[in-house]
Amino acid sequence: MQAMHPSDSQNSDTQPLPVTVRAFQMDDWQDVVELWRQPKVIWGTLQMPYQSLDDLHRRLENPPERLHRLVAVTEDGRVAGMLGLEVGRGRAAHSAHLGMMVHPDFHNRGVGSALMAAALNLADNWLNLTRVDLHVYTDNPAAIHLYQKIGFEIEGTLRRFSYRDGQYIDSYIMARLRE
């Protein structure tokens, strides 16, 4: 999920950032580790602080089999964001759960929108999914706005969903349904 810390001010450069969205490659692993280790990414996602390089590398090398990983790459080759779309199994094979993170250097620059557009294209036109859902903390209005803008609706509140910075945090479950 795109993390926006409450103390963030608007990025002074609000011009859209040209990015290429493509599949994650192991050559990207160091940029993704840098992304995962950002305090604002940890704040807005379920990532834990103090993860070792070995653990993160192993996690990237051994993804779940139904996980599609996309990265948004800047013109100079830097990973600006990452999205995972994990397709359900069995009777839930028509659905997927999505998680996304954008590097704080690139917030409010269209990176999250580019990743979401690519993921929904994959979901609709290649995987034939009719449901895509995600969790987003209730205190992350920028991410909630992005998801609502592209058709996600709040289905409910998961109370005390996770523990962050010494307190429990509620999360919305949001979904986009396709006929």
Image (tube, rainbow, N blue to C red):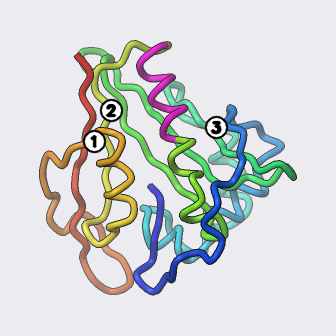
Q: Height in image: 53 above or below 154?
A: below
Type of the residue with mark 2: Val
Task: Determine whether, in the image, residue 74 is placed left or right of residue 140.
Answer: right
Residue under the image location 44 percent in, 47 percent down: 99
Callout 1–callout 2 Cβ contact below 8 Å: yes
Marks 1 and 2, the one that precedes in the sequence: 2
Q: Is residue 154 magenta?
A: no
User: Which of the marked residues, 2 or 3, is nearer the chain's N terminus?
Assistant: 3
Magenta region: 116-125
**Which residue is drawn at the image coordinates 35% and 19% (left, top)?**
129
Circle 3 is placed at which residue position?
62
- What secondary structure is found at the residue carrying circle 3? loop
In the image, taking residue 159 as reference, residue 169 lies left or right, namely right
Q: Of the two numbered discs 3 and 1 on the same chain, state the one appearing first in sequence.
A: 3
Count of numbered marks: 3
Can you give x and y, in whole percent of width and height, for residue 171 in the image?
Answer: 24, 61
Look at the numbered disc 1 and give the secondary structure of its residue: loop
Residue under label 2 = 132
Q: Residue 55: percent from the left, percent from the top?
A: 66, 57
Q: Give the number of the disc on residue 152.
A: 1
- Element carrying mark 2: strand
- Say which of 11 and 154 sits in front: 11
Give the residue at x 61% y 72%. Answer: 38
Q: Is residue 110 above or below residue 70?
A: below
What is the quadrant of residue 120 in the picture?
top left
Give the quarter of the image for residue 139: bottom left
